[in-house]
Image (tube, rainbow, N blue to C red):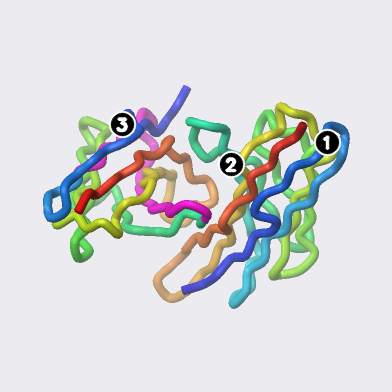
Amino acid sequence: DQQVKQNSPSLSVQEGRISILNCDYTNSMFDYFLWYKKYPAEGPTFLISISSIKDKNEDGRFTVFLNKSAKHLSLHIVPSQPGDSAVYFCAASIGEGSQGNLIFGKGTKLSVKP
Amino acid sequence: GAVVSQHPSRVICKSGTSVKIECRSLDFQATTMFWYRQFPKQSLMLMATSNEGSKATYEQGVEKDKFLINHASLTLSTLTVTSAHPEDSSFYICSAREFDTLGEKLFFGSGTQLSVL
């Protein structure tokens, strides 16, 4: 049973528009959420995170929204750029200091077209 | 940022042979490293936690005698897939944990695609 779900395997967006990547989770004990970006032939790199005490965290073009009641989070990229084309993984953990126990989603492949 | 090097990036081996994958933290010391496995169209799944100087901790369902982990130094952890079989074909990736003033961060290697014939 998957505890972290990314139901869209792929997403295509025009350059300059908003990209919205969604993630759902089932374990109500999760209290720390992260997004990782992965380019081909490279390992995932940390993008942005959010603690369950917040409902929004912003870093430049990237904003993560958390809806605890719906057990849903989303990553917004505005404006999208071709260099954002990558696979995005949503991950969750119990406790911010327990990233070793991250539970990952399957990933969503984002393609930003010029 | 911190760099984690993982080698090899791709390996093809015959069934029954053993394969060793190395994970190195290049500019920081990592007392803890993690090994993951990702099958096609599946999530990255944690296999084991590698602790420097002590035995690795394996996740449920992961055979410790098949996936040997050695973390002999603060910058190197190795995963050996012993007597590999076609069902072990997967993408293996490591990460290393670093603590700084901002807290805990994970840095990932680039992964190893293992194909067992």
Q: Residue B91 falls in which quadrant of the image?
A: top right
Q: CA distance from mark 2 to mark 1?
A: 25 Å
- Which chain letter matches label 2? B
- In this rendering, position of residue B26 left or right of residue B82: left
Q: Which residue is mark 3?
A: A8
Q: Earlier in the sequence, mark 2 or mark 1?
A: 1
Q: Which residue is mark 1?
A: B14
Tell me residue A6's x, y (percent): 34, 33
Q: Nearer the viewer, mark 2 or mark 1?
A: 1
| Residue B31 counted in the magenta span | no
Question: Is label 2 in contact with label 1 (beta carbons under 8 Å)?
Answer: no
At label 2, counting other C-alpha atoms closer than 10 Å, the crowd grade (few under 14, some 14-19, many 20 or more) is many
**In the displayed image of the protein, which residue is found farthest to the front?**
A114
Tell me residue B33's x, y (percent): 63, 57
- Which chain letter matches label 3? A
Span shown in magenta? A20-41
Q: Residue at x 70, y 38 (%)?
A: B115
| Residue A34 counted in the magenta span | yes
Q: Residue at x 59, y 65 (%)?
A: B4
Q: Which residue is mark 2?
A: B46
Q: CA distance from mark 2 to mark 3?
A: 22 Å
Q: Nearer the viewer, mark 2 or mark 3?
A: 3
**On screen, residue A43 above or below B58:** below
